[in-house]
Each structure stands twice: as structure tokens, then as C-alpha cells.
Image (cartoon, grey):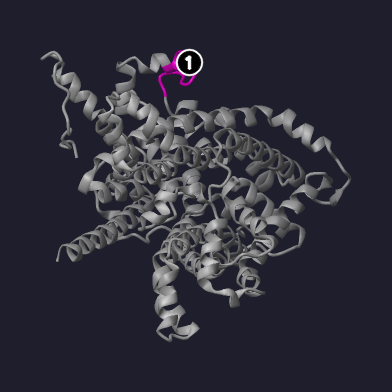
Amino acid sequence: MSTTAPTSPRAGSHVLAAPVRWLRRNAVVLVGSAALAYLLVPNLVVLAFSFNKPAGRFNYAWRTFSTDAWTDPCGVANMCSSLGLSLRIAVLATLIATAFGTFAAFALARYRFRGKSTTNALIFLPMAMPEVVMGASLGTLFLNTRVQFGFVTILIAHVMFCLSFVVVAVKARVMSMDPRLEEAARDLYAGPFQTFCRVTLPLAAPGIAAGAMLSFALSFDDFIITQFNAGPSTVTFPMFVWGAAQRGVPVQVNVIGSAMFVLALVIVLGGQIAANRRKRV
Amino acid sequence: MTAVAPPSPSGPASAGAAPPAGKDPDGAVAEAGAGRARRGLTPYWLLLPAGLWLAVFFVAPLFYQASTSVQSGSLEEGFRVTWQFSNYTDALGTYGEHFVRSFCYAAVATALCLFIGYPLAYMIALRAGRWRNLVLVMVIAPFFTSFLIRTLAWKTILSDGGPVVGALSSLHILDVTHWLGLTADDRVLATPLAVVCGLTYNFLPFMILPLYSSLERIDTSLLEAARDLYAKPSTTFRKVTFPLSLPGVVAGTLLTFIPASGDYINAQLLGSPSEQMVGNAIQKQFLNVLDYPTAAAMSFILMALILLMVSVYMRKAGTEELV
């Protein structure tokens, strides 16, 4: 990307100015690449330290190369069960939030009705609220109503903060859809149900998929809101890592982190390459 | 993620109209297309599940919190509403420093995110060419690893006597930060610098993605026009590019500042007790001390201050609708 040639080099400066000019022209790329490195270095450190054999209980300093953790990823008590709990909550929260959020997005994108701006504010507010506030206030509700903290309270919390993101993603997509396509379907004698299934839904699918993926990622990785609404026996994976940071971080935590990183990267890059190839053919 | 979520509406029809086009004209267009028969109760039925969920589990809790914040009592005897407004003054008295620290750290981290993130977003949107998607994936890639694990990785990177601290020390940068009161004793860990660095790192993608989505929408022929009219690159940036990217700047700063000011993970993992932010205090009062009224009062103050700052900022920036 450093070779993006300038379209019209300004002539008439000193000869010595050439390197300076090159620097100036590519400053954005240089700083941008440094920023990219800043973003990616921790991931590489996590990956490298998944092959470490630390001396003590904390995996912060390099000692020797070892694949012990990779051959026994579930060797730490309670870690894989917390991973399972996180996955179950993320899947359920994604399903519920995507369904409810999509309904709401269609209502907001397609209809004019009384109370619309209030609804928009209600959708926007959770995104403009720090997580501690949402977590603590929902926890207060459960305390006051004597609801037992556990799986259900975590699920409720996750659906709550995922909803807004789904609505925003789906609404943007539905609004950018050409209404004439649906008119065309109707003109060709498609029933309302057929129009919805064959035209509207496929057109809205990328937005729905984006909302679902966002929900899954947010729910799976959430810590703050979860901590305020979890029971003593429901420890999600981020909560396990938090606890480990106090007691001693097993190498297996890095293994899970690296495996997730590599797996997701392969899926995304594979999809990109496949899409590129399809475009070229 | 507000401004990112729209997966680049393909038609120039919506991109050209820019965000201020708002919802009402669109609603009108869509309605005309959808036909007149679909009025009535349908939108309310569609909104019911999500609306109810947010009303019960987002709005109602805020009222419960308001009531808890003026209660007094103890865990054994139970808490009762006694209009104990001293909870607020006590919280501010005891944890005033935490509030100041939170907003300072969040502001510095937001500014750093803007300075680091803008060139990267600019590079992806206008200079990356066919590498654009790859670089975008690399920006999102860190999210694939749980952010607690990534924050812990900073403990390794910034460890005492490690290569980063060594380099900073030999370049005399540590002397400067020491003089500024950001570091102490040749360490970076357990100092304000580490916490700000962690906050910047954790929320940088939230800055880059909205910036990218507004820079990507810029019609490059406008930049060419500026050049044709003999504008210097810096003038082009100041007068054309930056003003056009302002919606992204506003969205990005909000998406960075709000979560950063409520965060307690970076302060806990990378800081020492003297870098604790207001989130740490709320978390401790709620989960360890079980002093719910104080926690509720603090959380209420935090919410009020943030809403106040956001509304002032959005009025100043002239963007009232970001969603």
C-alpha cells in the first residue's frame, strides 16, 4: 500500500527535498501502519505466550518453549465449562436479540407512528450508557425483586445490550433497500408472504447477519455487565479470566485466545478470498 | 459501533444524502412504497418484544437505581427509602478523585485514539486500494481474542525491565513522562501511563470504524477539485476532508469516551490502587462492600455527568441524530 503513486507530483522544488516529500506523502501510511501494529501486537504476544512454560502461576515472563498447553487445552479446572457457558449464553442471546431487534428495525424503518422518536431514543440510550451503569442498575432491579442471579439473569442482560446494535444494523440495511423491488414483486402477483420471503428477507439478510455477528461477539466477550448479574456458580469465560488474573493465569487461557483469533481470521479471510474469486470469475 | 453498523449501503442514493437525511424523509418514502394498507397496529406489534425488554430491563432498573440511591440501612436490616441525599455528597466526597481521574483518563485516551486512529482510517479509506478489506479485517481482528486476555498481554509488553520499558528509558521518554507525573520509578506498569495506554488500545477500533465509514463516503472528486484549484494538501485536508469526516469524528469520540470513562478493567489490571477509576469504586461498593445505596448514587452521578457532556458536545458538534 506504500506504492500508491501520487497523481500529480509538484515539480519545481529542491532536489534535496525529494526524501522529505516522500516522507510527507507517505506519512499517513507510515503512521497508519504503526497504529495497526499497536492494535495487533497484543494478539501476537498472546499467541507467542501460549507456547510458554512459565515458572510460577502467572504467564507474564518468557521461560521455555513448550506445547503442553496446546495438547491439553482443558487441563485447567473450570475453564472449559466456563467457555461452554459463554457459548451457550452467546448463542441464545444472539437468537433472541436478532429476532426481536429485526422486528423493531422493520417497524422503525417502514412505518410512521406515534411515539417513534421516543422509541428511537430508547434504542439509542443503551449505546450511550457506560456498562457499569447498566450492569449496576440491572443488578439493583434483580436484587430488589429477589430474582436469583444466574444463567437467566445473564441472558436477560446480554439480550438487553445486544438489542440496540441489532436494531441499528438492520434498520440501516432496510432503509437503504429499494422499495421498488418489493413493488415489482407485488406487480408480478406475489402474495405478501411470498414477497417477504423471496424479496424482503433476502435483501435484509446482510443487515440481519451483521447484527447477529455483532451480538454474538458482544455477548461472548462481555465482562462488566455480566459481573454485576452473574450468580456464584455461573462463571463465564471472561469472568474466569478475570479471576485468573488475580490468582494466576494458566497458559491455557492464551491457547483459547489464540485459537479463537486464528479460527476467526481463517474464516474471515477465507470468505474474503472466496468472494474475490467469485467476483473475478 | 453506531456509525459502523450500516454495512456500506451500496447505492449512492443513501450515501450521497449523508446522515443528516434523517429518518423522517426515509420513513415517508418507505411508507409510500409499502402502501397505505399497512398502518394501524402493526408497528406496535413489531416493536412490542424489543420495547418491552428494554422498558423492563433497561429503563425500570434506572428507576430502581434512583430509589436505591436515596436509601439507607444495612445489609442485615435491609435498605429503606429515607431520602438519604447524603449518599450523593458522601460518594462525591469519598470518590471525587475517582470521578476526576476517570474523565481525565478517558479524555486523554479519546484524544490519543483520534490522533492514532485518524491516519489509519484515512489510510484504509483513501490509500489502501485493493488492500482495503484486508486492513479492515486486521483492525477488527483483535476483537476475536477476548479483550481481558489482550489487556493481560499488555502486562507482558510493559513488564518491568522488558524491551519496551528499556527502549523508552534509553530514549529518555520515561524521563519526560516521569516529569509529567505519568510514570514513576522506571516502571510503566501500575502507573497512569499504563492505564491510559490500555484504554487507548482497547477502544481504538471504536474510533477507527466510524471514522473510516465517514471518510469512505467522501466523494474523491471533491479532493481532486481542491487540488485543481491549487489547494495545498494541508489546505485540502483542513477545508475539505476533515469537515466532511466530522460525523465520524463525533461518533468515534463518543464511542470511545463513554465506555472509557466507565471502564474499570484497565485500571484494575494495568494500574495500581492509586489509578482506580470510578468504575472500580462502583464495582467494589456493589460486589464487595455490598453498599448498594452508595454504588447506586455513584452510578447515577456518572450517568448524569456523561449524558450532560454528551448532550453539550453533540450540540456543539451540530449532530443531533447519530443512529
Q: Chain of mark 1?
A: B
Along the line of sight, the residue nearer the viewer: A133 or A114: A114
Front residue of B104 and A259: B104
B227 displayed left or right of B24? left
Q: Between residues A190 and B145, which one lies in front from this camera angle?
A: A190
Compared with B157, A266 (above or below) is below
Q: Is residue B142 left or right of residue B251?
A: left
Numbered disc 1: secondary structure: loop
Question: Is residue A127 on the magenta stretch?
Answer: no
| Residue B180, above or below A81 | above
Q: Is residue B183 magenta?
A: yes
> Magenta stretch: dominant SS?
loop
Question: Can you identify the residue that label 1 sits on?
Answer: B180
Task: Tell me the quarter of the picture where residue A36 sits.
Answer: top left
Tell me if residue A45 comes above or below residue B271 in the rendering.
Answer: below
For image coordinates 34% across by 40% down, the residue present is B121
Q: Position of residue A192 (x, y in %)?
A: 49, 83
| Badge 1 density bin: few <14, some 14–19, many ≥20, Cα 10 Å | few
Q: Residue A10 appears at what percent x and percent y?
A: 17, 23
Look at the image and give the residue range highlighted in magenta: B177-187
Q: Is residue A62 visible?
A: no
Q: Position of residue A233 (x, y in %)?
A: 58, 62
Q: Using residue B252 as the reference point, say whether residue A124 is left or right of it.
A: right
Q: Name the outermost residue toward the right.
A: B82
Q: Position of residue A209 (x, y in %)?
A: 41, 65
Say which of B301 and A21 sits in front.
Answer: A21
How many tags in the picture?
A: 1
Q: Amino acid at mark 1?
A: Leu
The answer to whether any part of residue A89 appears in the image is yes
